[in-house]
Structures are given as structure tokens and as C-alpha cells.
Amino acid sequence: MQSSKSAEIAALIAQSERLTYSDADEALRLAEEAARQVPGSTDLMLAVRALQRCATMQLIFGQMHEGQRSLLKALTIAEKEDFEAVRGEIMQDMAAVYYTIGEYDDAIDYWADCLDPANALFTVETRVHSHIGLGQIYFAHENYEMALSHHRRAQRMAGTALAATLRCRVLINVATDCLRLSLLDEAEKALIEGLVLAEQTGQNEYQEEISVYQSTVAMDRGDLATAANWLDRAEKIEHVCLWGQNLRLLARGRLHIMNSEYDAALNILHHALELSAEMGISHKAFQAHHLLAQTYTHMGRPVDAEQHHRRYLEVFTRIVRPGTYSRLQQLETRFQNLLTD
């Protein structure tokens, strides 16, 4: 029989999950309350779930370091109690946090462990997430072919049996790779398929993200009216994830540049830069600096353009290091049998 303390924690987790999109502030409060009650719980698996839930909501709100601390607490319990499948989930989440804050070496280490065949009890979901993550690091290093290779691998592993939200996430990453490779038809195909899944599951964050990338497809085709329509749609979607808001701001800024609306672009892009700094997302910051440099160049303000171009290069160089790429290459060699059909 479940103890009253365990029942209370379980109820808090369940209610937080239900309120994620309808009342995100309350969902965060409930998740943090569940985590606070962990020391009094005798159900250690439930304690781990409470900490994972807390981390999920903290990360949604851009609280990267707080989310990281919650995950570390969960990982400590999972390792001590030999909760192997859950340990893999947490390690994957830790890797994602490190990736988000630009600590790519640590992210690679965690994702490498997630793909290690020695961790036989790690789930397929964990391994799919890890291929997505490694593909994103390749993407950051501008090796879009290898990024697509990992994301196609994740797509094959996910098949049609895994959760629709995970399959949708894979498709979004496939689409972004295809965008950079100028495979616009393939990108659009993945986005259309992903949008169906996002709408079926009520995943607002993914609907917003897909709408932004559909706008990018339209911009790359020179169809600025359609691009604006997709961004308008993205802005009408209720969301709580600051990542999606930042992505949307960058796309809107780019559209303003293409429409020669430079004052509007400055306002939007400075907002995106502030949000990137608030969340500690370096790779979004350098994108904002890059677009700001373009804007100031068009406005005939070379001093301001040079300042942002310099900041773009500084941030890019800080997070995209040659040593990191070498680690990726070592990982490819180490798991060659995993990464080939």
C-alpha cells in the first residue's frame, strides 16, 4: 500500500503534468513542491520521478542551472539504487542541458555513455535522444551531413512505435538539417509530418517550432508573405517554453531584414539577444549577434556592425572548439558498429 507521503508526491507530479500547458506557473510550483518532499519519501523511484519532473519544468522556464541541480540529485539516487533505465533517461537529460548552455564536451561524454552497448538496460528512447543530441552538436559545428546522418539514424530507431512526441522531435531535427543543406522539399515534408504529430498530441512547443521552420522554408524560397503567415501562426500558439520564443524572435528578425525593416529588426533581435543571455543559451546568442551585424551593415552603421560581428565570432569560437570536434570523431570510431546499418 502506498504511504500517505508517497501518495502526496505522486499527486503533485500528476497535477503538475496536467497543468504544464494550461497553467505553467502552477505546474512549476507543484513540481518544486514534489521535489521538496523527496527527503521524506521511502519510494525512491518516485523520488527520482519527482526530481525529474521538477527539472523538466525548470528547464521549460529557462532555469538551466536549477534544472541541472535537480537532475544531479535524481542521478545520485538512480545510481545508488541501480535504476538503470531511469539512469539513462537522466544522463540524456543532463547531456541536453550541457548542450543548451554550450558545454559540448560534457554533453558528448554523457551521450556517449547513453549509446554505450555496455549499458544494456538503457531504453531505445534514451538512445534515440542521444543520436538527436549528437546530431545537434554536429549541426553547431556546421557539419550538416553528419547531423542529418545521426538524425536519420534516430528516425529509423524511432520507427512508428515510439511516442509521437519523440518522433516529432526527430522530424524537426531532420528538417533543420535539410534546411541548411538546401533540401527544402525534404525539410517541408518532415515538417508537415511533424506538425500532424504535434497537433495530435497537443504539443504546443513543437507546433510553434515547426511553424517557425516552415517560415524559414518560405524565406529560403523568397516567399516572404508565406513566411510572415507562418510566423503569425507561431505567435498565436500558447507556449511556455522560452526556447521557442527565442527561435521565433530570431526568425522574425531575419524576416524584417529581408523586408528592409531594419528598425523593427533591431528591436526584435536585441530582445532575442537579451533572452538568450537570460537563459544562458550561447548558440542562440551568436545567431542574434550575426543577424544584428547584418542589420547594422544594411543601415550603414559599420561600427555597430563590426561590434556584433566580433561578438558573434567570440561566442562561436568559445562554444565550437576544434577539440570538441575531435571528440566527436573519436566517438564515431568508437561506435562505428552502432552508427552504420
Image: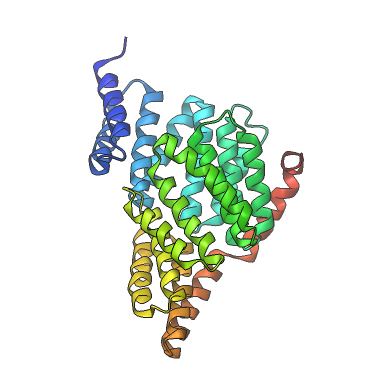
Left or right side of 126 for 237? left
Picture coordinates of residue 52 (x, y %)?
39, 36
Foreground: 308 or 92? 308
The furthest residue to the top: 1
Foreground: 14 or 67? 14
Left or right side of 318 for 68? left
Picture coordinates of residue 84 (x, y %)?
54, 28
Residue 304: name its quadrant.
bottom left
Q: Does residue 103 sit above or below 89 in this rendering?
A: below
How many numbered marks are there?
0
Q: Does residue 18 sit above or below 329 in this rendering?
A: above
Color style of the picture: rainbow
Q: Residue at x 36, y 47 (%)?
A: 60
Picture coordinates of residue 148 (x, y %)?
65, 51
**Residue 48 seen by the camera:** yes
Q: Does residue 229 sit above or below 256 in this rendering?
A: above
* Quadrant of the rendering where the N terminus is positioned: top left
Residue 76: name its quadrant.
top left
**Residue 280 seen by the camera:** no
* Quadrant of the rendering where the C terminus is positioned: top right
Foreground: 234 or 295? 234
Picture coordinates of residue 227 (x, y %)?
46, 62
Left or right side of 273 for 329? right
Residue 292: name its quadrant.
bottom left
Q: Does residue 264 sit above or below 140 in this rendering?
A: below
Q: Residue at x 27, y 41 (%)?
A: 28
